Amino acid sequence: FENTMEKVRSKIMHLDKIKSLLDDESKDESAMICASLVESSVNDLVVALQRLCESVYAQVSPSKQLKKNVFQRLSDGSDLWKDYCGEGYQDWVTDGEYKALVRCFQQRHILQHKDGLVDEEYLRKSGDNTYLLGQRLVIHESDVLAYEAITRKIGERVLSFVNKAQ
């Protein structure tokens, strides 16, 4: 989990260097590669949290059978933690952070399954009213850094359950 958090932060923090190295070849290719690095970071964060939660939950509640990819669905994953300890993601972060995390998870879904094209489900579930149906998502570096901080905050809380179980 920590390695992924550092990898994401490093990708974002070094984008200017990467862009300047690639700009000599082609500004269009440079922009495309940098956008891809930013977009892949969203997936990295969601998958890191999913894997961490699956691993920790299996340790602290080994008899509970989990549905496939349950921790990719934010509300379902949060409900599992509520069942376990009486608190979920919304209890561990601010309202604004939770809304940003919902947007992050929805953006990952759109990037993975819709090639970044906004659909009605994204508009409904994300609360993101900056897009119209059919537009392509544009993920900003600052968004990824905010998502990383929120993911890290939740991950640290999840990891604390391992320490308590030992």
Image (cartoon, rainbow, N blue to C red):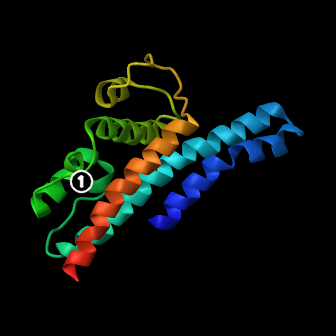
165 sits to left or right of 135: left
Residue at the spot x=16%, y=72% of the render? Answer: 61
138 sits to left or right of 74: right
The residue furthest front is 94
Residue at the spot x=48%, y=20% of the render? Answer: 134
For numbered disc 1, what is the local secondary structure? helix
Front-most of residues 127 and 108: 127
Q: Determine whether 16 is above or below 82 in the image.
A: above
Q: Position of residue 109 (x, y in %)?
A: 41, 40
The amino acid marked with disc number 1 is Gly
Report which residue position mark 1 lands on: 77
Residue at the spot x=10%, y=57% of the render? Answer: 86
In terms of image quadrants, where is residue 126? top left
Quick one: quadrant of the C terminus? bottom left
Q: Determine whether 58 is above or below 145 in the image.
A: below
In terms of image quadrants, where is residue 66? bottom left
Q: Position of residue 63 (x, y in %)?
A: 14, 75
In terms of image quadrants, where is residue 7? bottom right
Q: Position of residue 121 (x, y in %)?
A: 33, 28
The residue furthest bottom is 166
Q: Determine whether 103 is above or below 41 in the image.
A: above
CA neighbours of label 1 inside 10 A, class few (<14), some (14 to 19), many (20+): many
Q: Position of residue 159 (x, y in %)?
A: 31, 68
Front-most of residues 149 and 38: 149
Q: Determine whether 8 is above or below 56 in the image.
A: above
6 sits to left or right of 160: right
Residue at the spot x=29%, y=55% of the render? Answer: 71
Quick one: quadrant of the N terminus? bottom left
